[in-house]
Image (cartoon, rainbow, N blue to C red):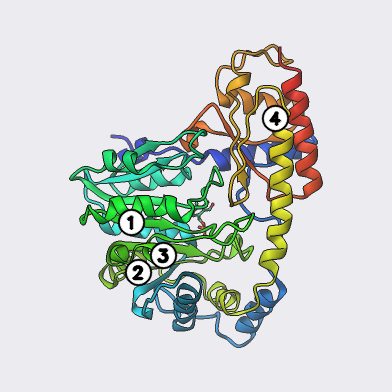
Amino acid sequence: MAFLADSLKRIKPSATIAVTDKARALKLAGRDVIGLGAGEPDFDTPDNIKEAAIKAIRDGKASKYTNVDGIMELKEAVVRKFKTENGLDYKTSQITVGTGGKQVLYNALVATLNPGDQVIIPAPYWVSYPEMVYLAGGEPVEVPTTMESGFKMKPEALERAITPKTKWVLLNSPSNPTGAAYAKAELKALTDVLVRHPDVWVLTDDMYEHLVYDDFEFFTAAQLEPRLYERTLTVNGVSKAYCMTGWRIGFAGGPEPLIKAMAVIQSQSTSNPAAVSQWASVEALNGPKDFIPKHNKIFKERRDLCVSMLNQANGIVCPKPEGAFYVFPSCAGTMGKTSPTGKKLKTDEDFVTELLEAEGVAVVQGTPFGLGPAFRISYATATSAVQEACERIQRFCGNLR
Ligand SMILES: Cc1ncc(COP(=O)(O)O)c(C=O)c1O
């Protein structure tokens, strides 16, 4: 009898973590490696947030268990955030707080999926979505998009993917891995479809809401289409915009019965997210936000640098995304060519492996995100490193025969 559960056979380990580990091992071996794999800001958590955490520890507020799905002060801060930033009215009883956006998404899926239930996931997608759906016993249904359509799902494609078994449609804008974000009219076209399907729920992952460039205006589904409010879970968190990936706080607003069910899952698995992180997040949400536009100015410069330099690399085509801190270029033009070590590039995995070997640049292949041959670059690292990495990619592509 096998010791490990059958459910493990259905899921893959994270490709983004795999590439980060490989780059770290090469670095330890003394190689000059530029890592563009990790999906987290290079900026440190702002000082006011750190100070609030230190104060919470000193005041003895971090020592004990808290309410399972978040302290009231944080739920109140989340209610204010949704009201002022998204025009969404939630009561504190409609708010849940978990250990990162990741746990919140996972709780939602575990709390709702029965075997055979389908979750529509536009591709490319964040690597964890299909695996979480599998772990929760459901079936991911991918809806492919193309680079030409800006990696955005068309309403007709959404309509076609909906079946009597569809429980959720998962939206992620701005997107990991493409950075693509739905403009108001594009999102409205999708919510118009969803209004006609009253049994389908909307799981919207707005983690990169604040990371948008060129005056892009962010909208979330329930804000744009109030008729979806009763069947939408609006997920967000402090990880990306507030440079708090290590603190592990995510949250969501939604219908009370769902929020309660998610708290039951959390109560029997991890209990409350770290108390100190919750107090830090209260300050993040209630405190000054002037660092966000400052960071965005730097992110935008890096995005523009990547797009311009990668489009000058032989065989690479790099669209300009609206947000997040990723670009998702196609490397189709390099397929079939031979690397300096004599390896013929047949897949995007070959491309990223040879790039790491030849030039010490760590990026993630596109296929695990649901579209290839392509690769994801996270430009959330020093601008000089981004520039150097793009120069190396240009040289690598120029040396392919
Ligand atoms: C699209 C998306 N959703 C959710 C998350 C999870 O965020 P957290 O670190 O808060 O768990 C990530 C993190 O990479 C992400 O890219």
Q: CA distance from mark 2 to mark 4?
A: 43 Å
Q: Secondary structure at mark 1?
A: strand
Q: Mark number for residue 148? A: none
Of labels 4 and 1, earlier in sequence is 1
Callout 2 crowding tier (Cα within 10 Å): few <14, some 14–19, many ≥20: some
Q: Are marks 1 and 2 in contact (CB under 8 Å)?
A: no
Callout 3 crowding tier (Cα within 10 Å): few <14, some 14–19, many ≥20: few
Residue 189: image location, x then y, percent: 36, 50
Q: Is residue 118 left or right of residue 239?
A: left
Task: Name the residue tied to disc 4.
Answer: 356
Q: CA distance from mark 3 to mark 1?
A: 25 Å
Under mark 4, the amino acid is Leu
Under mark 3, the amino acid is Thr
Of labels 3 and 4, earlier in sequence is 3
Relative to the observer, which residue lies in front, 274 or 92?
A: 92
Circle nearer the viewer, 4 or 1: 1
Residue 316: image location, x then y, percent: 65, 27
Task: Name the residue tied to disc 1.
Answer: 202
Q: Is residue 379 visible?
A: yes
